[in-house]
Image (cartoon, coloured by chain):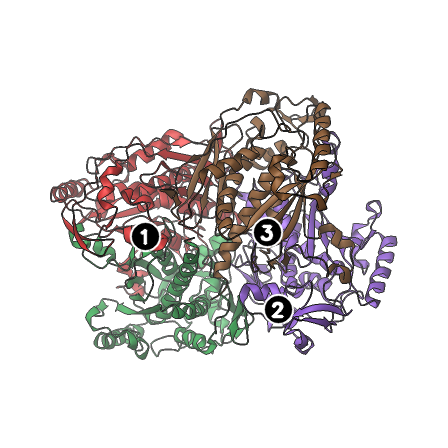
Chain colours: A purple, B brown, C red, D green
Amino acid sequence: MAGNTFGHTFRLTTFGESHGIAIGGVVDGCPAGLALDLSAIQAELDRRRPGSTQLGTSRNEADRVEWLSGTFEGKTLGTPIGFLIRNADAKSGDYDQLKDVYRPGHADKTWEDKFGFRDHRGGGRSSARTTASAVIGGAIARQVLVGSGIRVTAFVSAVGKLKADPAKLDLAAVWNDPVRCPDPATAKAMAALIEEVRAQGDSVGGVVSCIVQGAPAGLGEPVFDKLEADLAKAMLSINAAKGFQIGSGSEASTMRGSEHNKLPQGGILGGISNGEEIHFEVAFKPTATIAKAQLAMDRGGNAVTLEAKGRHDPCVVPRAVPIVEAMACLVLVDHLLRQRSARL
Amino acid sequence: MAGNTFGHTFRLTTFGESHGIAIGGVVDGCPAGLALDLSAIQAELDRRRPGSTQLGTSRNEADRVEWLSGTFEGKTLGTPIGFLIRNADAKSGDYDQLKDVYRPGHADKTWEDKFGFRDHRGGGRSSARTTASAVIGGAIARQVLVGSGIRVTAFVSAVGKLKADPAKLDLAAVWNDPVRCPDPATAKAMAALIEEVRAQGDSVGGVVSCIVQGAPAGLGEPVFDKLEADLAKAMLSINAAKGFQIGSGSEASTMRGSEHNKLPQGGILGGISNGEEIHFEVAFKPTATIAKAQLAMDRGGNAVTLEAKGRHDPCVVPRAVPIVEAMACLVLVDHLLRQRSARL
Amino acid sequence: MAGNTFGHTFRLTTFGESHGIAIGGVVDGCPAGLALDLSAIQAELDRRRPGSTQLGTSRNEADRVEWLSGTFEGKTLGTPIGFLIRNADAKSGDYDQLKDVYRPGHADKTWEDKFGFRDHRGGGRSSARTTASAVIGGAIARQVLVGSGIRVTAFVSAVGKLKADPAKLDLAAVWNDPVRCPDPATAKAMAALIEEVRAQGDSVGGVVSCIVQGAPAGLGEPVFDKLEADLAKAMLSINAAKGFQIGSGSEASTMRGSEHNKLPQGGILGGISNGEEIHFEVAFKPTATIAKAQLAMDRGGNAVTLEAKGRHDPCVVPRAVPIVEAMACLVLVDHLLRQRSARL
Amino acid sequence: MAGNTFGHTFRLTTFGESHGIAIGGVVDGCPAGLALDLSAIQAELDRRRPGSTQLGTSRNEADRVEWLSGTFEGKTLGTPIGFLIRNADAKSGDYDQLKDVYRPGHADKTWEDKFGFRDHRGGGRSSARTTASAVIGGAIARQVLVGSGIRVTAFVSAVGKLKADPAKLDLAAVWNDPVRCPDPATAKAMAALIEEVRAQGDSVGGVVSCIVQGAPAGLGEPVFDKLEADLAKAMLSINAAKGFQIGSGSEASTMRGSEHNKLPQGGILGGISNGEEIHFEVAFKPTATIAKAQLAMDRGGNAVTLEAKGRHDPCVVPRAVPIVEAMACLVLVDHLLRQRSARL
């Protein structure tokens, strides 16, 4: 059972290598009768696109979604929604130097260890490019959620050691800022840090926070499919994610019960939403591919010096924002539909 | 699709309410021919038991596993392994006061919101008691892993603000210490803190860390079922868990790529194990049930004062250690078996 | 992924060997709030029991269900319903002669080929005894169906070459007849045939038909999980089943379209129920275990003569009737719940 | 959970409406390292194509597979294999008359009952055209099977009341004959019957038989996922299939045990392959769409006369042969991979 399907009732299956013919996916289980706004989905995809912010990579793909099935006269049929995006701008030649080298901090060697074989061009399927399919699936999911009054908003809350001030957030303004940080003063400093890091041929990590508003009480399943468990899985499935915290998160581990019980509970208790805002955050490591010369290992086990020539983000978090939203939407819509069977 | 099954190829399904007749489970997909050491499984369960450490609750159940199926002449048949534990020592009367009250920090109200109805005695199925079934499933899984040279060791790395010193850990000594912290000096301070908190009728949070040794390269599935994603889900499915970090975790978000690439990668790259040690940690909130008087809400929406009379742990992490190990074993064995189909 | 779970939204997982400690199961996904009539479930189980009809085997087990979890104050909690039946009357000694012999028409050798190892006593998990767990799961399912006005009635429509007359069926009278054939005249002849066959130390096959009344239009999923496909799988998972026909069945293959289009369509079109009665039938082979001396093969590949000493049915179909009903109920309740997510 | 995915370890997810943009699918779980012969897959697809035999419909689509992902340098990567076929020759105008009419024997009304809405053009997703995706998935599966020495051969064994003579079959010659019946004399009579039926504006049913050679002992899972149960589900998921029989099938129901035990067991015992040839057959109803005038019902419940103008097969079985093979290959490869986890 390979791991390219996400969800139970609302399921996204994705396919595609970074430098193959196309990437894409199939959404199965989207309820019939939804008036699907395809241009809104394209707009969500555009936010993830390389080139969507001047802080990202210079790889610039049109990334137009081709819709293949599942709708008729503008509405979902209840049948699978197939879609693809062609890999138009794949400069595979950039990656020839990587054929026999394992990049530090990348999946090159582990995928080869797993499958005995890999598509070395741009990381193949381990590339962050595959998240474009998740963004499309999530954007479809969001259109179901919106009909139930559920809003999912992610934003950059930290870049390196710079943290947004929770008291100064304007959630409506996330997309106006190139860092996707809705605390304008901190956003400015973050942008400067990212440019500095880029100039050094280096990269820097960061944190994406997410707030779910309007989720009804009762979402999440007992024991193993707790809502926070499925969110954690969804977030750790995003490339470069290293940590997940729900509600009070790690801070909770340092607190007393008498103190913690008075806090908001992050919108979830015992695995099930309680009707309050759901808050979680995801920590991302710095982009592994950097221009700076690094030591790497080649297939023969020899140390080689590597200067990455591909185009890469100096900081992954601005472009991770739509992916965090998408994965959260996929989790929520699945539990929203599963909840329909909870009671007689 | 209710959430009481964990895993794909090696699957654990559990059942049972805290104060019902019994709790238990079914392991399906355990390979045939394993000489199952039942007393070792009972020993693992004993480590989780209330009363297993003097720092835990005073509820003392024998918690003897009754084995129902799946073995013959001491070996697994390849058929489902059914088991149960009777709820012998259930003082349900202790919980009568909770019938119409929603305890702060508990799932009482959310489960009722979900199902329209609940077993209020001891939290019903939202009780941490249900993790006993996970420990049994994990202990079976561990016996498969051991045959492949995989060792899973969890321990308490923090209680409140007290942190174990990573340089002073003796992993072989975890179970000798009542706090389950293998840094003896810090363990002593942790024990004192827990007793202090108990005396105050309060509770405190903590962190459990886990190290997987001997995992071969190649475990984990592309994209959605990354090894760290499945570990994150497993850990966040444990009661009171609030955060998960793999490898460098949240720290990674503050680092530069040139710096981070030189670190060990937590044993996983691109979702797939690389043959190195796998390190992760889980943050737990303080036990929600405390003896101290607290404000709670009753069914009618009125504020009431609550002094918990049930028996509860002042700090959940010592008893969370075997549960973290069990859930990790379940994830690893599932991926170990799934890996058998990765190549022609 | 071992095959001991049936269903998606309403799931039954079973365990247990014929002569082990117990058989049982877990129903996950039964909606909360159902007033579960446990004595009705026991009554359904009693209909399957050896000894329930004088035409069956003489093995006589009390087969009392022990309920373990999932209900509170008489209603389902929405949590897993665990149950078991102890194997009280297991005369395992009867099977010692079979330790090294593979019975003709049985799974003895194939299970050993699969798992490298088997519990030879009474067929272990390949025994028809395991269907008792399915009957319990199906009986729970039926109580959900009844609330939606869906009635599932199976009956014996053929024993050997004797066929019930479709025009003479009184569906309300199935359980009054020991053959479970609601055409009284044919039933009498069938009973005589079964007794004759028993006297000869032989066995005979038969057909169970099933009629579903009150199913709403819209049940069944496109393409792979068509309602008839899931029914076919459910029926062929019953021991000794060799054929499945929906609606006009094999007869359809000999007809013209102009003729066939005028017929009732068996209640399903394009995989989805149309609101009419659903008709299907299941063909069963004669019981493989017979008293008559037969040639068999032993572990060493030698021919041996076998005279079965265990207690066995001369004709499996009367006792298959409740199993066919149970499996049909499991399929229908699963699709009934899945249908809740079909539309916005 | 919509039903557009088939299989557990080797999974096919399909999408697409008959007259939408494209149909296609994703194969997930195909082992890495398989040298995939794409032209062989195209050849299998060509056998299913309308126009592949002069006995079929005159709809003539090129039906070229576009491969999107999952291979590199001619070999499978272990990642999802995405593919599509464009709907080039869709004369949707032919179907305008059907917008408000429910064709007899079709899924028009049931799909509308299910989803509240449908794509009426050519049956939308209920069209047999969707089976092209299954044929592609099955053709990939076959290439795995062939490496394990497993051969799957289906053929037409009956058209209307004409039956092939089992003693005269030349399995190597199936594809040389337009009826796909390897008994030449009967094939000739079948062809004449089909032409006669076509001339009458009518259709006729038939039977496809299938033989699996070289399957090792041990395939199939206990209890619910028996090999014959999964085959039954696979076959009944094919449009127009009405019955499934394994081994002695319905005949078995008329036999004595002493007689039946001496027969070959259809290659499966207790749900698990025994290493012998596996034999099963699938009964198909006559094509529902016929040129002959028929009574139908419109959306308003009025009777209308319908003369189908689309292009349709007078007999579905010749073109069902590659679909039966494909679905059988999907079942077998899934169980072949699942078997890798059966033993320690």
Neighbor class of circle 3 (other Cα within 10 Å; few <14, some 14-19, many 20+) is: some
* Res A61 visible: no
> To which residue does mark 3 refer?
B213
The kind of residue on which mark 2 rests is: Gly
- Left or right of residue B120, residue D258 in this image: left
* Res D301 visible: yes
**x and y, in percent, of residue D325 in the image:** 37, 67
Q: Chain of mark 2?
A: A
The span from disc 3 to disc 1 (Cα, nearest Å) is 34 Å
Which residue is nearer to you in this view: B276 or C343? B276
Q: Could you tell me which secondary element the residue under label 3 belongs to?
A: strand
> To which residue does mark 2 refer?
A124
**x and y, in percent, of residue A30 in the image:** 56, 55
User: Height in image: D107 above or below D203?
Assistant: above
Marker disc for residue C112: 1
Q: Residue at x 24, y 44 (%)?
A: C317
Q: Chain of mark 3?
A: B
Q: Are marks 2 and 1 on the same chain?
A: no
Q: Chain of mark 1?
A: C
Which residue is nearer to you in this view: A99 or C209? A99
